[in-house]
Image (cartoon, helix red, strand yellow):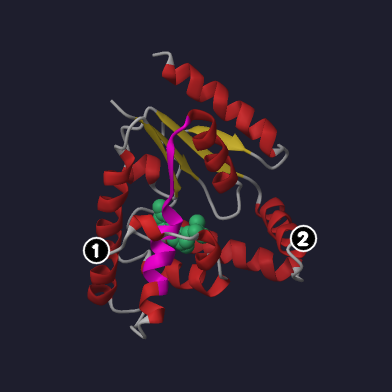
Amino acid sequence: MTFTIAIDGPAAAGKGTLSRKVAEAYGFHHLDTGLTYRATAKALIDRGLPLDNEAVAADVARTLDLGGLDRNVLSAHEIGEAASKIAVMPSVRRALVEAQRAFAIREPGTVLDGRDIGTVVCPEAPVKLYVTASAEVRAKRRRDEINSAGGSADFDTILADIVRRDERDSGRSDSPLRRADDAHLLDTSEMSIEAAFSAAKAIIDAALKH
Ligand code: DC
């Protein structure tokens, strides 16, 4: 039997960093499901295909190779915007959820992070975490990240962007961003990544003992 850890939350809440740390600590496979939406969007853009044709986007989603997902290539802002547009399409979601579920059963265990893992992709996961932080804290972290990478970023623009992304992710009718009833809430607004990891570890260790 495999062991699945579902980690959801809004953009820039720290769930990616936390998921990678958890996967490494337990020797589990990790899938950032946001990358599956981003890779589908990038494939459409690269092939000059429209971003508003659901049948075309679903065809591309069905042929996606989960092995070739590269965060560095897929992190561009425009790709994130395009991804959040195709993420509202039910047949795109069905295709990607099928691939994500196939990933989730890998041995000895898996960590999947995204928006709908605990609610839709892996509702039976023995551990569900909902990682969040205030929009201001998330915007500040993103700004610091961009600045330390040598870029220059305006706080108000980033904040507006995060709020808009939250609305799109929470407001869509198919699989909106939502905390599962049985998910543990981790509000990282005033928590370091180490503190968030310790809290997650305590929850996971307790579940593994069952
Ligand atoms: O987490 P991210 O920024 O890489 O996600 C890109 C987009 O994909 C985001 O707008 C929400 C969407 N997404 C989703 O709908 N469901 C998921 N499980 C993961 C991401």
Residue 83 vs 205, above or below: the answer is below
Residue 173 screen position, x and y as percent: 34, 59
Q: Quadrant of the C terminus?
A: top left
Q: Secondary structure at mark 1?
A: helix
Quarter of the view holding residue 102: top left
**206, above or below 132, in the image:** above
Residue placed under numbered mark 2 in the picture = 148
The quarter of the picture where residue 154 lies is: bottom right
> Vertical placement of 156 versus 14: above or below?
below
Image-based side of 34 in relation to 156, left or right? left
The secondary structure making up most of the magenta span is helix
Q: Residue furthest bottom?
A: 48
On residue 114, which mark appears? none
Q: Give me the residue at 53% from left, 63% from top.
A: 165
Magenta-drawn segment: 27-42
Residue found at the very far top of the displayed protein:
209
